[in-house]
Amino acid sequence: NREDYYMEKTLQELAVFLEGKLETTTPQMVITGVNGLEEALASDISFAVPPHIEAAAASGAGALVLPLDAPFSGKPVIRVANPRLAFARLLDLFRRPEDVERVISPLAAIAPTAQIGVNVAVLPFAVVDSEAVIGDNTVIYPHVYIGKQVKIGEDCKIYPNVTIREGCELGKRVIIQSGAVIGGDGFGYITEQGKHSKVLQVGNVVIGDDVEIGNNTCIDRATAGSTIVGAGTKIDNLVHLGHNDVLGENCLVVAQVGLSGSITAGNNVTFAGQVGSVGHIKIGDNCVFAARSGLTSDVPSNSFYAGFPAVPHREWLKQEATLRSVSKLVKKVKELEKALAGLQEKE
């Protein structure tokens, strides 16, 4: 909110911060905010990448962050190798400082055996159960439940209404958005004579450093052992990871993905929106799965799959092209049948 928070940086300072090349005759021009092209004001800086470079000229932004080789004139420019990354860094630079007071609220329920680090905030109506460990500089927002023997690393943010069940472990700088449930029971049952009996879920969930977990996402605890999310992985809203899943490092899991239990995925795997899977499959490193793909078998490293059941993307494109031509083939067959019937009548 610009009315109650104000920061200013010169273009020269921003160029140094971004390690970019400044092109302007006014290096001391003051920038007070960061915004998108359409919303930006004269005191803002924005960014553009192809094919939006021309549109950037019409933006109200006072300055732009652009690629190194994009022709442009008319506004001050900071040129960098990766404008999107630079924009993210600017957003972080100009963000309003967190105003959470680092105290333990008297309205929070903290078990006597819980260990709370230094500079930690536990806000009203949060619950920290027995033998839980909270690392330094972590913020626990209202109505969070931290279960027994949970371990949370340094510099984490746990937003309202998150549940972290007993025995689960979080690394450093983990962010969990509102409503997520970490360590709920895995979906394990034995069916005998039509009756489903629950299998006790005695494992936990282990979250690596720098992981972010979106709103209302659920990561089930392992039946035995651990459900694991590797360091640097980012998980969107409304995602479900089944019991004993193992995701590698720096994966991207987009909204409404549902992965069955006991999947092992490598590093740098991308699951686009609404991808689903069977359980007990192995996925290699650097794979990409297009939206609504259905994974039914093991997938080798460096694959790009689409469709249901998921197949290599080029094969899926051929299948789709064939399906789209079916109506024309049906029409042609009917015409041939009609012509054949006419010939038979003449005979």
Image: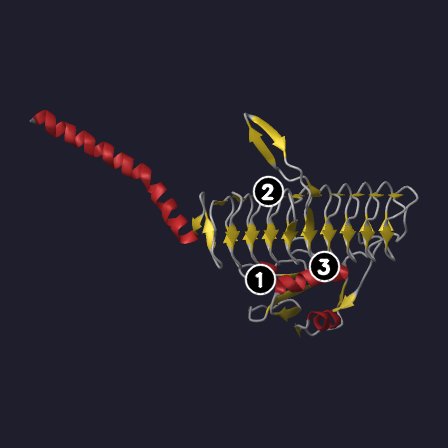
Residue on which the image places disc 1: 49
| SS under mark 2 | loop
**Relative to 166, 76 lies left or right:** left
**Which residue is drawn at the image coordinates 62% and 61% (left, top)?**
84
Residue on which the image places disc 2: 256
Q: Amino acid at mark 2?
A: Gln
Disc 2 packing (10 Å; few <14; some 14–19; many ≥20):
many
**Which residue is drawn at the image coordinates 66% and 55% (left, top)?**
36
Q: Nearer the viewer, residue 330 or 146?
A: 146
How many callouts does the rendering have? 3
Q: Nearer the viewer, residue 45 or 276?
A: 276
Q: Amino acid at mark 1?
A: Val
Task: Indicate the position of residue 295 as horizontal and vertical percent values.
Answer: 49, 46
Q: Amino acid at mark 3?
A: Leu
Q: Quadrant of residue 82?
A: bottom right
Can see residue 100? Answer: no
Q: Mark 3 or mark 1, which is nearer to you? A: 3
Q: Which tag, 3 or 2, sits closer to the chain's start?
A: 3
**Relative to 189, 302 lies left or right:** left
| Disc 3/disc 1 C-alpha distance (Å) | 17 Å
Residue on which the image places disc 3: 91
**Is 331 above or below relative to 141?**
above
Q: Which tag, 3 or 1, sits closer to the chain's start?
A: 1
